[in-house]
Each structure stands twice: as C-alpha cells, then as structure tokens.
Image: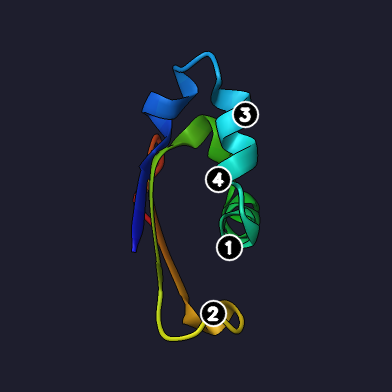
Amino acid sequence: MAFTNLATLRSLPIYPQIRQRILNRQLHAFEDFLRPMGIEPEKDIDEVMLGWRGEVVGPAGFLGMAAGASNPL
C-alpha cells in the first residue's frame, strides 16, 4: 500500500522531477481510469492511495483510491 499527498508535492518547486519519478505504470493506468469520468488528475486529485493484491500481473491485482476536488473513487 502506498499513500501520496499530491497537493503537498505540487507545491514544491521540484514537483516536475518528483512527478517523473512517481508516475509509474500503475499510477499512470489509474490516471487513465479517472479521465473518462471527467476527473483531471493534475487538477482534481489531492491524495492517492494505491495497493496491490498478490503479484502485480495486470490490473486485477491493483487497487486505488483518489480524493480531492471530486468525490473519492
């Protein structure tokens, strides 16, 4: 399980470098999942919690929750 407060990270001057490091395949897939619902991750999401169940062999073992300007998903 991993938790990230994106609102705090965005306030840092080195956020672009941090974003490159933390935007792994799973987080990118989660952002892609949110966009069709009208949620823009860079503007609407302040906190992200990600978890993996068992081995990461695809999206079935991946869990995520986002909170911010939109309702938690």
Amino acid bearing label 4: Ile
Q: Which residue is mark 2?
A: 56
Q: Secondary structure at mark 1?
A: helix
Point out which mark residue 17 bears: 3
The residue shown at (48%, 81%) is 61
Q: Which residue is mark 1?
A: 26
Amino acid bearing label 1: Gln
The residue shown at (40%, 81%) is 53
Amino acid bearing label 2: Val
Amino acid bearing label 3: Gln
Task: Say few, some or many: other residues with alpha carbon within 10 Å of mark 1 (under 14 / 14 to 19 / 20 or more).
Answer: some
Q: Secondary structure at mark 2?
A: loop
The quadrant holding residue 24 is bottom right
Q: Are marks 2 and 3 in contact (CB under 8 Å)?
A: no
Image height of 43 relative to 32, above or below: above
In three-dimensional space, the C-alpha distance between marks 1 and 2, rounded to whole angstroms, equals 9 Å
Q: Are marks 1 and 2 in contact (CB under 8 Å)?
A: yes
Q: Are marks 1 and 4 in contact (CB under 8 Å)?
A: no
The residue shown at (60%, 42%) is 21
Residue at the far top in the pictured view? 13
Point out which mark residue 22 bears: 4
The quadrant holding residue 58 is bottom right
Say which quadrant the N terminus sits in. Answer: bottom left
Point out which mark residue 4 bears: none
Marked residue nearer the N-terminal end (1 or 2)? 1
